[in-house]
Image (spheres, rainbow, N blue to C red):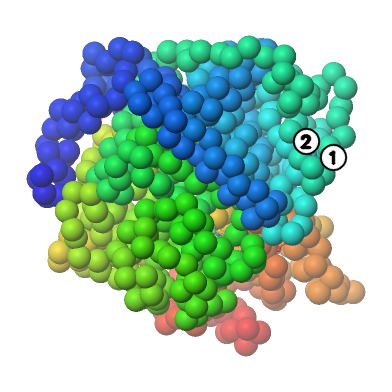
Amino acid sequence: MSYKEEYQASIDNPEAFWAEKAAVLDWYKPASRVLSRDEHGIDHWFADGELNTCHLAIDYHVENGRADQTAVIYDSPVTNQQQKYSYLELRDQIALCAGMLKQCGVEKGDRVVIYLPMIPEALISMLACARLGAVHSVVFGGFAPPELAVRLDDATPKVLLTASCGIEINRVIEYKPIVDAAIELANHKPDACVVLQRPQAEASMQAGRDLDWHEALAGAEPAACVPVKGSDPLYILYTSGTTGKPKGVVRENGGHAVAMKYSMTAIYDFEPGEVYWAASDVGWVVGHSYIVYAPLIHGCTTVLYEGKPIMTPDAGAFWRVISEHGVKALFTAPTAFRAIKKEDPEAKLAGQYDLSCLKTIFAAGERLDPPTYEWLAQTFKVPVLDHWWQTETGWAIAANMHGLESMPVKSGSSTVPVPGFAIEILDEAGNQLGTNEQGFIAIKLPLPPSCLTSIWGDAERFKSAYLETYPGYFTTGDGGYFDDDGYLYIMGRVDDVINVAGHRLSTGEMEEIVGKHPMVAECAVIGRRDELKGQLPMGFIVLKNTEGAEPEQVVTELVSMVRQDIGAVAAFKEALVVARLPKTRSGKILRKTLRSMVDGDDYVVPSTIEDPAALDEIKAQL
Ligand code: COA
Ligand code: AMP
């Protein structure tokens, strides 16, 4: 079927379309209704179907001829280790880990927070939760104690799983002090904290609460898959919103499994048995979907890489992994390619490896900028495909549907809407805009399978944040336009979310932290353009009392406050002390104008500005 036919079928009759895609999965009981609406008016896919996501990802393959096939390749240049797990070995380890969780009192519906580096136990424990019908919430290792504490309070887990450390290139980051501080800060205390001791650091244990991972496993019995409903949550993944409180995106088992499976053929053009590599982190949505769930549900081999694109040990790291493990497709964030290109502009290191296995490169997390696209396409001579997605959807909203038909690439575009996503470009009032007109990107309801169905514990926030701006639509928070050929161009966020090295962060949250400093009267944080990381946060600070104040000292303190509260990953290192902020007459800070000015773009001074001199003063300081 051509893309056009497939897409039209998904829009004309979504239920028939997704029922057919769902039929290839091994449900315990198929759903009696494919799409249903709950009492709050929210759509759910396959709500009363029965399945288990771990069964689909693991046990099903063990029982159907893939027991000896490699399921996971753990490749860790930071520890000089590699390990392969067959589907059978993985099943046994997951079943035991599930048994360990069960012994800690975890049952279907209970939450488990996972704060682990990129080691096999991360993937194993996610699937162990799925096996029990428990809900995992993975927290990215680069987040500081307050971020972890907020998630503990929101998800109220029974158990927290962690390790003694993560490794950043050659720096050992001790996790246990972070975890201890987070539990101290949080109102909700997990019953147990299971700690994997890694040889690089020894975690100190708190009697009565902390358990040694291996000792706990030794006393556990393997646990079987527990059937769950299609609408039961598989996981919560927190993502940055516009305020300090992150949003707990709720992903349901049924729709997620169907979308993951479908995407592996329609988008990624994969056959079971082939090797897929998403060079991301399990703490992000890309890691959830394409390191763990989708490749395994499809019976592929997935690579779990504990390293960086550069410096572990060099800018040839990705090419080594690809050639060594026979990777067919690489998926990562453009920032990783920019880092490699900066170190090795002529890709000399790539020339040292046989990359004939590599058939496609996929990019997401931020826009694939044309220079990076050109470099990749010319160097590797394989299709380089950008696709646009969000934590909220769990998979691509717009992509080059590589598995359906060969579609020409237009540099700067993430190509066309993925089947199921009825994308429209709207103006502020909700009117549909024409081609080549830039506006707010919205998705007409119902959203396809896998998209979020709530914000954990806050259904009202789900509605107010996503569904109320344009009734009948989901608001994506991104702006963009369609061209005459129906290609979609994503032009960036229209809210206070920024993208730093493929990591989604909230400038609103940074402003809240900066605003707590006793010397700060007011502030604005914007994302300014950065050649390597895409964007970097930059603060504009007005001090309360400039007499005797040492602006440089205040800025140093602000940088350290953001690092301590959010984590190193926030990369907040730059702030400018200014006399006043540019505002509209109604008091709104002109963040967009500031951003354009800092980026050196053309900008129009809004007619609503209170005092144009405020902008000129800042311009003179830059
Ligand atoms: N645990 C602890 N600290 C972490 C961390 C983790 N898991 N991940 C990042 N950090 C730290 C880094 O060490 C760095 O600390 P520093 O300020 O002390 O140097 C800081 O957070 C910022 O990290 P990052 O933004 O990643 O910058 P970098 O300069 O260390 O590396 C890249 C730049 C491009 C190599 C790196 O960002 C990268 O590989 N990006 C790919 C992004 C990605 O996979 N995104 C997922 C979506 S597909
Ligand atoms: P996250 O939820 O962390 O995946 O971040 C989602 C946000 O990243 C989106 O709302 C976009 O702003 C941005 N993004 C992701 N993929 C792309 C892409 N291919 N092109 C442009 N922006 C992207």
Which residue is at 62% across, 15% downward?
A: 99
Report crowding for label 2: few under 14, some 14 to 19, many 20 or more residues within 10 A (C-alpha). Answer: some
Against 262, residue 306 (above or below) is: below
The amino acid sitting under disc 1 is: Glu
Against 163, residue 540 (above or below) is: below
Q: Quadrant of the N terminus?
A: top left
Question: Is 127 left, or right, of 439 in this rendering?
Answer: right
Question: Is 50 left, or right, of 566 in this rendering?
Answer: left
Residue 321 disc label: none
Q: Quadrant of the C terminus?
A: bottom right
Question: Is 277 left, or right, of 263 in this rendering?
Answer: right
Which residue is at 15% across, 64% downward?
A: 485
Secondary element under disc 2, as helix, strand or loop, is loop
Q: Which residue is mark 1?
A: 202
Q: Position of residue 364 (x, y in %)?
A: 41, 57
Which residue is at 64% across, 18% downward?
A: 101
Q: Position of residue 221 (x, y in %)?
A: 63, 12
Q: Position of residue 373 (x, y in %)?
A: 37, 71
Report crowding for label 1: few under 14, some 14 to 19, many 20 or more residues within 10 A (C-alpha). Answer: some
Q: Please indicate, yes or no, whether residue 213 appears anywhere in the rendered image.
A: yes
Q: Which residue is mark 2?
A: 197
Q: Earlier in the sequence, mark 2 or mark 1?
A: 2
The amino acid sitting under disc 2 is: Gln
